[in-house]
Image (cartoon, rainbow, N blue to C red):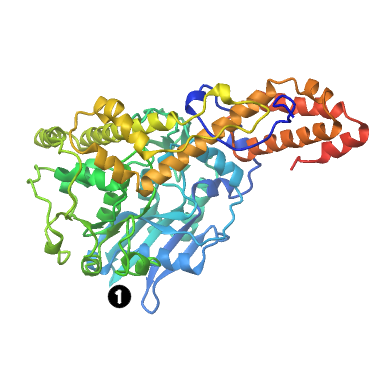
Amino acid sequence: MSRRERGPEPGSGGAEATAEDAEPAEPDGPEQCLSLLPWDRFSAWLHCVCVVGFDLELGQAVEVIYPPHSKLTDKEKTNICYLSFPDSNSGCLGDTQFCFRFRRSPGRTVSLCCFLDQMDRDLPVYLKKDSAYYYGYVYFRQVRDKSLKRGYFQKSLVLISKLPYVHLFRTMLKQIAPEYFEKSEAFLEAVCSDIDRWPPPVPGKVLQLPVMGVTMKLRIPTYRDKPGTTPIVQNTHQADAQISMALPTVHEVDLFRCFCPVFFHIQMLWELVLLGEPLVVMAPSPAESSETVLALVSCISPLKYCSDFRPYFTIHDSEFKEYTTRTQAPPSVILGVTNPFFAKTLQHWPHIIRIGDIKLPGEVPKQVKVKKLKNLKTLDSKPGVYTSYKPYLNKDEEIVKQLQKGVQQKRPTEAQSVILRRYFLELTESFIIPLERYVASLMPLQKCISPWKSPPQLRQFSQDDFMKTLEKAGPQLTSGLKGDWIGLYRHFLKSPNFDGWFRSRQKEMTQKLEALHLEALCNENLVFWCQKHTEVETVDLVLKLKNKLLQADREHLPVKTDTLKKLQTHINDIILALPDDLQDILLKTGTT
């Protein structure tokens, strides 16, 4: 049978790049995806709210879970209990805020699947939710209270969410937690009712989120945003009694404040995070450990950090044995710890960051050398970076001078963070652009896409071929930094971050080819083709076309709505030209 005579096949294959001109689909709004039930809006933002208290006989215990129907396994409750309180050695008197991250128990189904997937698709890759993990956002209060046996009031209000919106939930807790500690359960119920009236977390829209008399205004980034830009959310006058608060970001931490204790080593830390090296942050409190871990993870943005990271990790964590064993090499993970026990337990780890109390920098930190691991004995060791790692790239003295000058001139820490974030962004983009350019060249040409054959496959990634491109189209085109870039790339290609990045690009490009194949089908005169072929071949074609439509919906292929409608019209026209008995069968087949 000739190529012209064969029916189109729904195969799988390559991607974007040379065929990248096809316009994206026009997705339906997430609000239209399904009708919302009570607590569905709440569930789009939070899994639940927990109150963790201290019981003299039981220790830490979950006292309240709201809404009451929220499901947590015993293992999840245990993790939340221990991660919601600072270690006793931290001595956190007063109010403390921090966050943690823990593994979800497997086997949980999500009722809002379509609703949440639509929003997840529009997020930058580094903000996409990881369904295997929950975040816990904590507001912990410890104050003296002689009326209690222990002499202290100790309680945590904890927001459990799949969303990595650190700044949003931190701001929200600061508003509601102090009042909750005074008013208790009824207040918590009112807070959750407010959240259940919030609009969905749609990327790209300015959202207004009212909670207990305060309206937070914010915008969640989209993948279409230019990296490094944050559209300003303006405060507008509120006609009612609501207080309006514009959030400059939903997810970013104060980079400069976090890196200030070790800012002479920021470039080396960027390399360690990029390469997915095992890193532990030893800090005096969960606030410092969690912020520093989150700052490290964000320093390779817009790349996604693809390994596990734990902003606050304790000896009671369910993965404690897995991550501290000496029977195998330390895993690719970033841990934030405060317990002195870890200084001994993790002393075999290759890279350790020891930080003191993070304060707003009022003076220039003194130059400190990288310290040898054997000098790290306890948490009393001096702040610094303990490693034998030799960076691939030469040190960029300019950024250090620029930040030092900012400290001397009392430049606001927000402005210092902007400088630092731009530096990391430019460094990461200089590194990743040659990879993007090479991977784009693996895309088949658009003229290779035939409606009568499966979409062509992407060409294989070849490390040698990629390395050859670096001589003329390497990072030297956008970065003045010298050093062993080739060595850095070779190391990166073995890392989880490369694996995660490449899989994501492969998926995008494969979906692009599937979409182009679907468009090629739409542009054919399929009814005419059927007139030249047998009923068996025509039925086979209809079933394949229906499968293509189902695939486009299931995999969210980047296809315009008009194209899908056109293909459906083709299918209907073909079916109507068939005998009545076949029409009845085909109209009922392949529609689910």
Tag 1: residue type?
Arg
Residue at the extreme front of the image, as rendered: 1
Quadrant placement of the N terminus: top right
Q: Which residue is mark 1?
A: 150
Residue 411 location (% of width, % of height): 16, 33
Q: Is residue 84 above or below residue 202?
A: below
Q: Quadrant of residue 146?
A: bottom left
Relative to 429, 552 lies left or right: right
Q: Nearer the viewer, residue 511 or 157?
A: 511
Relative to 187, 556 lies left or right: right
Relative to 566, 273 lies left or right: left
* Residue 199 visible, this angle: no
Q: Quadrant of residue 357?
A: bottom left
Secondary structure at numbered mark 1: loop
Residue 534 location (% of width, % of height): 85, 30
Q: Is residue 368 above or below residue 578?
A: below
Residue at the extreme left of the image, as rendered: 366
Q: Nearer the viewer, residue 495 or 409?
A: 495
Quadrant placement of the C terminus: top right
Residue 175 location (% of width, % of height): 37, 47
Residue 380 location (% of width, % of height): 14, 64
Q: Nearer the viewer, residue 389 or 89?
A: 389
Residue at the extreme bottom of the image, as rendered: 57
Q: Residues within 10 Å of mark 1 (few under 14, many from 20)?
A: few
> How many labels, in total?
1
